[in-house]
Image: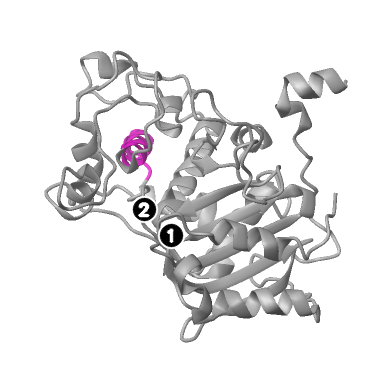
Amino acid sequence: SLILLMVNPSFAIINQLSHDQSLKWPTANWPENKLELNDEDFNKIIDYTFSTKSSETLGRTNALLVIQNGSIVYEKYNDPINQRTKLVSYSMAKSYIGLLTGIMIDKGFIDSKDEKNLLKEWTDDRKNISIAHLLNMQSGLDFVEEYDTNGRSDTLEMLFGKGRFDQASFASSFPLKTITPGMKYNYSTGETNILSKIIKIRLQEQNQDYQKFISDNLSNKIGLKNTIFEFDDSGTFIGGSSVFANARDFARFGYLYLRNGQWDGETIVSKSWIDDTRKPAKNTHKMYSNKFWMPHPAFTRGLPKDTYYCAGFGGQYILIIPSKDMVVVRLGETYIEDDEVLENLSEIISFFEDII
């Protein structure tokens, strides 16, 4: 069995625990069991995290929320941010598209991750782009993910320029750069918006409204009452970058994954989808799957090896850590190259005991 574990790391995935039945599900309110951590070292790292002393390495930390065993065990905000403040997800929104894709497959509205011929306008080799390629940044489209206004930036043109009213159609108009899809990982906000458009089209075929689908199958189910999903003028959820929520709602999203897609006796998304998300996809440098990140096995930045997470520009994170039965939300304004936010979170997390 040791040999099997070494050959196939997926066998070593730590099981995620079921919800503690002595606690209410956090649909309406999060149970609170806040820890009195009087450890001098812990207080020192928290003080550093929320002070201006860390501005050169962490930027500004606006919110830190730790969920363990289904309860809030630690919570802190940086004035004027508070419990009710909605903050932007940036690319954490991509993980929401990952979830919605899983729900669509569960319902049979998308056949599988292998489905191709996704857009009628893709009559050339783009017809070979699959759902899996879009989920894992492998479409091969010639879309440049840059944020420097001095050069080519397809992302900025899509978000704020001529593509802003129909972002997915703008992104899907680019030709292939690789010979065939699936050859290379290329991070692209455009790909996620394309996948969102495909979800919209499939829902239209079922005579379902996209916003209502999200409400009925996600928001109302798990209590996302402080979450806004932004849509462009074409009626497509801007899944590449635009969810606005408070820290507690972001934690609900992470908790759904920590509980294997289950919520209060109901399956929101299949466990098989969660399991698939926890295994790195091929050709992603062992760091990406279904719009979620995971630490590289050789460079974890101090995170527990079973961590997987949502990540957004500016240091937005939802960390899911089964070995600690934990969800950690960090929201901030971190615009520093080679920042140390994950190392900082790793140090904070180390003060909390492993559960599994």
- 332 is higher (above) or lower (below) than 116: below
Q: Nearer the viewer, residue 126 or 314?
A: 314
Mark on residue 272?
Answer: none
C-alpha separation, residue under disc 2 versus residue under disc 1: 7 Å
Q: Amino acid at mark 1?
A: Ser
Image coordinates of residue 222 in percent, x first then y, are 60, 58
Image coordinates of residue 31 in percent, x first then y, are 74, 72
Mark on residue 89?
Answer: 1
Residue span colored magenta: 191-208
Image point (88%, 20%), residue name: 1
Image coordinates of residue 122 in percent, x first then y, are 23, 21
Q: Is residue 156 left or right of residue 180?
A: left
Image point (49%, 46%), residue name: 95
Mark 2 and mark 1 in contact? Answer it, CB < 8 Å.
yes
- 56 is higher (above) or lower (below) than 317: below
Residue 44 visible somewhere in the drawing: yes
Q: Is residue 30 left or right of residue 169?
A: right
Mark on residue 241?
Answer: 2
How dense is the environment of label 1, judged by Cα within 10 Å: few (below 14), some, or many (20 and up)?
many
Q: Is residue 307 left or right of residue 187?
A: right
Circle 2 SS class = loop
Image coordinates of residue 225 in percent, x first then y, are 51, 68
